[in-house]
Amino acid sequence: MSRSTTNRRRARFTIGNDTGVMVANLTHGAYSFEAPNHEFSLSFDEFGDDDYLTYGQLRTLKRQLENFELLITEVTSDDVSLYDVIQGLHLTKQYNDYLKYVEDLADTEFDVIDYLAVESLEEFIEESTADEFKEALSSRIKDPLIETSVSLYRQGELNDRFKIIDIQNTRPKGEAEDFWRDIDASLE
């Protein structure tokens, strides 16, 4: 993650539909999307794959961005910041949670971010304390945390018993007891 030392404007302004934006796949597996008007399609093979889109195209992906299936990682314009794009898409609350937990930044520091790395999510899961992780599970980034944690568990990289129990406790009643057992069975 790189940070700029200059403060950027916080006021809203019009972002051109042709402004370039990089998005990355936060799902652990293949991801594809075709715009309803067949204007563009997006296809990723694995976690972390990225692609260039325009701001106009990005607006059709708002639901996927809200759910963190995709992560806005960078804006390719010098006139428009990452914060401007996120604010323009009304995703400020979601990305404030991402910054707070994953990047360990306050929402007041959002305007100095130039780039978000998808690997930061895995690093947070591996390096956070059990209390930090539990708190993050009750935030807007719960779904990508659980999905990434399960992927790390399958790879043998998540061994923290407390985090595993916290994830299990997020499951609906009746599913919690079998959650990890089902994942272990899928590995065989």
Image (cartoon, helix red, strand yellow):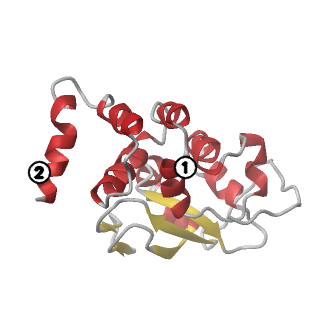
> Residue 51 location in percent, x, y?
48, 76
> Residue 119 location in percent, x, y?
52, 63
Q: Residue at x 29, y 65 (%)?
A: 29
Q: Residue at x 62, y 53 (%)?
A: 86
Q: Residue at x 87, y 61 (%)?
A: 5
Q: Residue furthest top?
A: 173
Seen in the image, is 128 located left or right of residue 1? left
- Which residue occupies the foreground of this view, 26 or 163? 163
Seen in the image, is 143 located left or right of residue 29? right
Q: Amino acid at mark 2?
A: Ala
Seen in the image, is 93 located left or right of residue 38? right
Task: Find residue 185 and name its label.
Answer: 2
Q: Which residue is mark 1?
A: 127
Q: Amino acid at mark 1?
A: Glu
Label 2 secondary element: helix
- Binning the other alpha carbons within 10 Å of mark 2 as few (below 14), some (14 to 19) or many (20 upward) gives few
Measure how far apart labels 1 and 2 are at the Cα level: 27 Å
> Residue 40 location in percent, x, y?
39, 75
Q: Residue at x 42, y 46 (%)?
A: 145
Label 1 secondary element: helix
Residue 17 in view, yes or no: yes
> Residue 56 location in percent, x, y?
54, 66
Q: Quadrant of the C terminus?
A: bottom left
Q: Quadrant of residue 33?
A: bottom left
Q: Earlier in the sequence, mark 1 or mark 2?
A: 1
- Contact, CB < 8 Å: mark 1 with mark 2? no
- Which residue occupies the foreground of this view, 7 or 104? 104
